[in-house]
Image: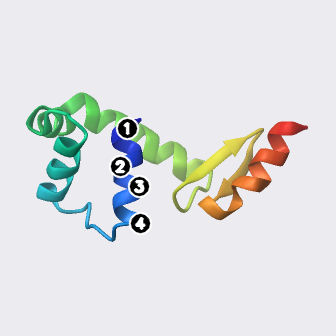
Amino acid sequence: MRLAGALLRAIWAEDRDISDAATIAAIASEQGLDAEALAAAALSPDVAARYDALTQEAIERQIFGAPTFVYREELFWGQDRLDFLDRALAK
């Protein structure tokens, strides 16, 4: 979760290019993680299969951006819509 938060912060607050492998490695290292081990794991067949499965699920649910949250089959898209999700959770 720490890495996920750092990657999102890199995109939205720091204007860093996380499509660049060196940038991802730097962010992972900044979080105290083994960037080389993460890169190797990311290229594994198991991770590729999981990525494909999750991509297909997102297509089937008609998810079109990130972050998207699904609660009771309702989509909540975007950081600026978290208040709507919060209200749905409170019901």
Q: Nearer the viewer, residue 43 or 89?
A: 89
CA–CA distance between discs 1 and 4?
Answer: 15 Å
Q: Which residue is mark 4?
A: 13
Label 2–label 1 contact, CB within 8 A: yes
In this image, 63 relative to 20: left or right? right
Q: Nearer the viewer, residue 80 or 31?
A: 31
Question: Does the rendering let one see residue 30?
Answer: yes
CA–CA distance between discs 2 and 1?
Answer: 6 Å
Circle 3 packing at 10 Å, graded few (<14), some (14-19), many (20+), is some
Label 2–label 3 contact, CB within 8 A: yes
Callout 3 secondary element: helix
Circle 2 packing at 10 Å, graded few (<14), some (14-19), many (20+), is some
CA–CA distance between discs 4 and 2?
Answer: 10 Å
Q: What colour scheme does the image use?
A: rainbow
Q: Amino acid at mark 2?
A: Ala
Callout 4 secondary element: loop
Q: Which residue is mark 3?
A: 8
Q: Earlier in the sequence, mark 4 or mark 3?
A: 3
In this image, 82 relative to 9: left or right? right
Disc number at residue 6?
Answer: 2
- Quadrant containing the N terminus in the rendered view: top left
Q: Which residue is mark 1?
A: 2
